[in-house]
Amino acid sequence: MRIAITGHMDIERCHAITQKNNHKYNPIAFLKTYNEIEYYLKQWCIENKVQFSDLELISGMARGVDEVFAKIATNNGLKLIISVPKSIEYHKNKVVKDTPTIKIQAIDYNTILTYDNIEVHEVTENFNKGGYGYFIARNQSMVDLSDYVLSYKRYDSTGTNDCIDRAKLQNKYYGNI
């Protein structure tokens, strides 16, 4: 069973904690987000009579919820599928145009890439002949690869909304954690 997630980069904001340095996580925000998502997945498995160990988790490898999802996969020995815009190198080194010190990618990207049960999808701008930009193409790829899409949405977010809408179009959106 393949499950993708969409959610926020600023997980600190999800828990009313001010983000002071986006090159590291506030440990309380990270742990709360991790525990909420992992608990939800385990409950979902019980309700749907699926073995937790059979899950394959799909991450877009952004900072925040995507990285938490990847960590849940690696910490539990689950298959991890990552879908990244353009290429690993492009995504790992992407900076915000007007603020190059802001980190938008997974903080522990390199460690996650060494995981032995990982499948990498580098998504081109023209993925599925959609003519999307790289990050929207990544969202479409994650939906296409998944059986279900979950969200971890606590405030309005264009990218999260886009992925939810795409999942709904394919009847794959399962709900918000």
Image (cartoon, helix red, strand yellow):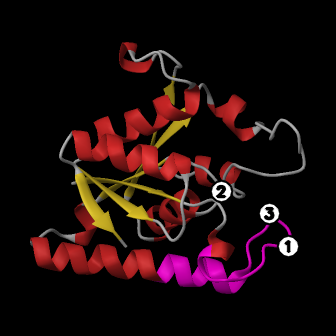
Q: Which residue is mark 2?
A: 63
As measured in the structure, the alpha-carbon distance from the residue carrying label 1 to the one carrying label 2 is 14 Å
Residue shown at 85% from the left, 68% from the top = 21
- Please provide percent x and percent y for residue 129: 38, 13
* First in sequence: mark 1 vs mark 2: 1
Farthest residue to the left: give it. 49
* First in sequence: mark 2 vs mark 3: 3
Can you tell which quarter of the image residue 175 is in? bottom left
As measured in the structure, the alpha-carbon distance from the residue carrying label 2 to the one carrying label 3 is 8 Å
> Three-letter amino acid code at disc 2?
Arg
Q: Nearer the viewer, mark 1 or mark 2?
A: 1
- Please provide percent x and percent y for residue 34: 51, 76
Which quadrant: the C terminus? bottom left
Contact, mark 2 vs mark 3 (Cβ under 8 Å): yes
Q: Is residue 58 above or below residue 132?
A: below
- Please provide percent x and percent y for residue 3: 31, 55
The numbered disc on residue 149 is none
Crowd around label 1: few <14 · some 14–19 · many ≥20 (10 Å): few
Residue shown at 58% from the left, 59% from the top = 67
As measured in the structure, the alpha-carbon distance from the residue carrying label 1 to the one carrying label 3 is 7 Å
> Three-letter amino acid code at disc 3?
Asn
Task: Read off the magenta span.
Answer: 14-35
The kind of secondary structure element at disc 3 is: loop
Residue 146 in view of the camera: no
Can you tell which quarter of the image residue 36 is in? bottom left
Side of 102 relative to 1 (left or right): right
Residue 131 in view of the camera: yes
The numbered disc on residue 20 is 1
- Please provide percent x and percent y for residue 73: 44, 62
Q: Which residue is mark 3?
A: 22
Can you tell which quarter of the image residue 1 is in? bottom left
